[in-house]
Image: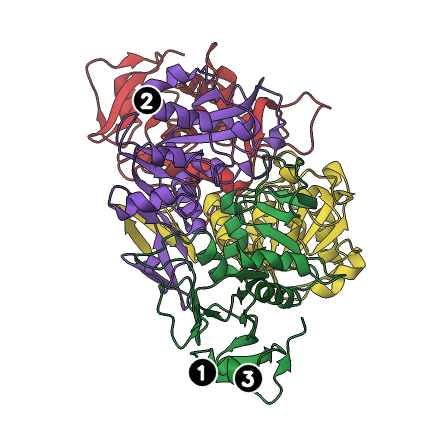
Chain colours: A green, B purple, C red, D yellow
């Protein structure tokens, strides 16, 4: 078990950063996924998209250096890097829906054995809206879920999502602080676990069936 | 053909019960002085089409707080708790639309299309009540055009004919909304003479714009 | 009868020019319709669109002053006026299909009582393709046909088009060197004739039924 | 990630029977040196998607004359008599598509849409074999997406990352084709360093571009 929330998030972000390849166009969801940008391996240059209309998004500006005309999809002031481009929302989602985004990293409330994702609504409780998440989950070439393994001790990786879906069967990879799990046609394949957990513990904290191969590795974080 | 007008001159255009499109993404690129005008006029029962309902003290959020809005068609209300509260109290109707679908529906109206087929939302709540069409073995939702009586948009540099240049991420929904309303009003951060914007740099041609008003600058736009 | 071809074209272009109103966005088809630009009444400022991507098209450049990057839809070098805008083909046809073009003037092989237009193909003989004509005829707010009244003595205004259609029921007004004919729900209404012809002659050169009101005027050209 | 290459390096990409999109409108904005390359390589049985087949001695017209083209999907062949002649001889297949529909079909592919509903072509030959869908009492044709193996486009100013700026009317189909092919090659009139094009001025983001070659300038582009 990894109980430190901040540490958990760091592990997840660090591990996902290793999935990104040179030259890829990457869209990071709001919240935990945003942290991935802090851990891109040296020598790897990815291009960040912000769905409000940027390719080539850079880090947050230094205080006092904000450009009021440039925000990210979370509403924060950001910078752009040399080679950046601005465009309108229709074009931005043409990039997203059209498969031009190589990887999107999204948070999740639930994921399941079929790669279904639920992250936009808890009926009667929390109705923020889907924003760009449905298009991102549907259109990106690769959908990586970044989330803590459980919520208040309850599994989030389920046999079947109970919350309304964001997209059906689109998740490729699930990365939590405890495990890296690939979504395959046969089901969820446990690829890696963190050194501070065990296969048994991961299984006990996962409602979905996990396929456990012989060569489960330790997460390199 | 005089398009540059005062806010006073715009007043007769607005009526209770109208459908307005308002540009901006979390208030970035939203015409704040036109929002002021709506609040001053106290027009009621508005249907607002916009990416989000912003924050309670900025942009479209202020219309929600002022109680002028009957319905919003939007992708996200999470940043404005007042919208959620009024929705739960049955005082405001919220139609949530995936962001990319919202952009395409607005564009479709503006481009004279009868609708578009999108994979976004298939297998989710979003498909409820919609026609599903299968093309080459893949399912799509038929999403219908979305137009408005008036579009309120914001431009960074606007010439007296209405040609618009948007800085940074303020572009977002503004250019497609300029295509999709009977009357288009642009609030300009800066108004310049005709000819000062290079034809290549025009992002919204002036032929789409009916009225131009001078807005504020920068963050107070 | 008006037998001089050049004079006939001039009459048509001159008369159509009077239909244009200040501030309108106008698309002139290739050939005869292009001549309309030469006769715009003083004080009327229309904006010309070229469907390859211009609003604000100007006249032909002086020899030696051509900009190789600027052509019209007929492939000729053109100029642009202050306030012009360039855009891509998808946007250009969003303007056209979306009803943002106020008037299009198109040539015709045949038109008929229902406002049907045929101008893009003579099967087995001439197959140039429809180019932008189908979109223009379908999407423009007002479709004016500019053509000589007959072809080799044969009527071109028919009871029913025999050639494949360009668009169904979209023509608003037919202007020939002999007559101005409005397409109404009741049929073709003769509004004006040229001083050098007679109602009887127009009827004899027209296959379609013409509604002849009491107040047929002379064309003011 | 090195995108600027020689024509020599591009050679292995082209194979007989491929589907190519080629930008330009009557050769304005067409990558002439890439046309030279195709002719040099003598690749055969090409399917070409383009606005028109230009003139016999320019742009796409040269491919037709060289006998490399099996099929064209285009809006207009009237300016190139060779296309018509080969069509009548059964040596080339011509699929005529209204210009606005062609643009939307290409955009739809690039934007991940399953199709679009257009009023253009209803009641004409164009509707043959197509699904008709009625929305709010109005008939539309369902037009399907159009993609290609390779898009050959032309940019006026291109940075080394592939961000493109188009001058004048050379933009036309180029930006939408950059969205709609597996491989995108841009022929640049001028190549500049990354950062030299303002993010606002980028008309095609470099993330869409795979290869950049240096073309000619001006009229000989």
Whether labels 2 and 1 share one chain: no
With respect to residue A167, does C144 lie above or below? above
Crowd tier of the residue under label 3, counting other residues whose Cα lies within 10 Å: few below 14, some 14–19, many 20 or above: some
Q: Nearer the viewer, mark 2 or mark 3?
A: 3
Judging from the image, what secondary structure is the residue with disc 3 in? helix
- Alpha carbon distance from label 2 to label 1: 59 Å
Chain letter of the residue carrying label 1 = A
Nearer to the camera, B39 or C17? B39
Which residue lies under the disc numbered 3?
Answer: A199
C124 vs B39, left or right, is right
Residue tagged by mark 1?
A209
The image shows residue B60 at horizontal and vertical percentages of: 40, 35
**Labels 2 and 1 touching (C-beta < 8 A):** no
Relative to C72, B54 lies left or right:
left
Instruction: Sort mark 1 into few (<14), some (14-19) or many (20+) by Cα contacts within 10 Å.
Output: some
Q: Position of residue C159 (x, y in %)?
A: 26, 36
CA neighbours of label 2 inside 10 A, class few (<14), some (14 to 19), many (20+)? some
Distance between mark 2 and mark 3 Cα atoms: 64 Å
Which mark is drawn over residue B41?
A: 2
């Amino acid at each position: 078990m990894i109980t430190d929330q901040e540490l958990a998030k760091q592990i997840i972000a660090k591990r996902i950063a290793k999935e990104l390849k040179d030259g890829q166009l990457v869209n990071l969801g709001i919240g935990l996924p945003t942290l991935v940008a802090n851990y891109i391996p040296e020598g790897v240059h990815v291009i960040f998209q912000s769905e409000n209309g940027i390719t080539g998004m850079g880090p947050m500006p230094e205080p006092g250096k904000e450009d009021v005309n440039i925000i990210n999809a979370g509403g924060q002031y950001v910078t752009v890097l040399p080679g950046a481009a601005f465009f309108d929302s229709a074009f931005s989602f043409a990039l997203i829906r059209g498969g031009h985004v190589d990887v999107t990293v999204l948070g999740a409330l639930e994921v399941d054995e079929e790669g279904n994702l639920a992250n936009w609504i808890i009926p009667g409780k929390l109705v923020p809206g889907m924003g760009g998440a449905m298009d991102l989950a549907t259109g990106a070439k690769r959908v990586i879920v970044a989330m803590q393994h459980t919520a208040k001790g309850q599994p989030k990786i389920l046999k079947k999502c109970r919350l309304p879906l964001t997209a059906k069967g689109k998740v490729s990879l699930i990365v939590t602080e405890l495990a890296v799990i690939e979504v395959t046609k046969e089901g969820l394949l446990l690829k890696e676990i963190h050194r501070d957990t065990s296969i048994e513990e991961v299984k006990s904290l996962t409602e979905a069936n996990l396929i456990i191969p012989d060569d489960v590795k330790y997460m390199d974080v | 053909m005089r398009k540059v007008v005062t806010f006073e001159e715009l007043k007769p255009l607005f009526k209770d019960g109208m459908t307005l499109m308002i540009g901006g993404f979390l208030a970035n690129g939203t015409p704040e002085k036109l929002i002021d005008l709506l609040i001053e006029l106290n027009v009621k029962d508005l249907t607002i089409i916009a990416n989000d309902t912003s924050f309670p003290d900025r942009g479209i959020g202020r219309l929600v707080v002022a109680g002028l809005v009957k319905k919003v068609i939007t992708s996200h209300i999470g940043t404005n708790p007042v919208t959620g509260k009024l929705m739960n109290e049955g005082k405001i109707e919220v139609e949530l639309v995936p962001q990319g679908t919202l952009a395409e529906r607005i564009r479709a109206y503006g481009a004279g299309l009868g609708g578009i087929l999108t994979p976004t939302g298939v297998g989710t709540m979003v498909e409820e009540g919609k026609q599903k069409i299968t093309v080459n073995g893949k399912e799509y939702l038929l999403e219908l055009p979305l137009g408005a009586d008036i579009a309120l948009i914001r431009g960074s540099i606007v010439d007296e004919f209405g040609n618009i240049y948007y800085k940074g991420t303020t572009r977002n929904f503004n250019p497609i909304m300029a295509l999709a309303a009977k009357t288009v009003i642009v609030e300009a951060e800066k108004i310049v003479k005709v000819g000062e914007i290079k034809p290549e740099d025009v992002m919204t041609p002036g032929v789409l714009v009916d009225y131009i008003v001078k807005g504020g600058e920068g963050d107070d736009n």
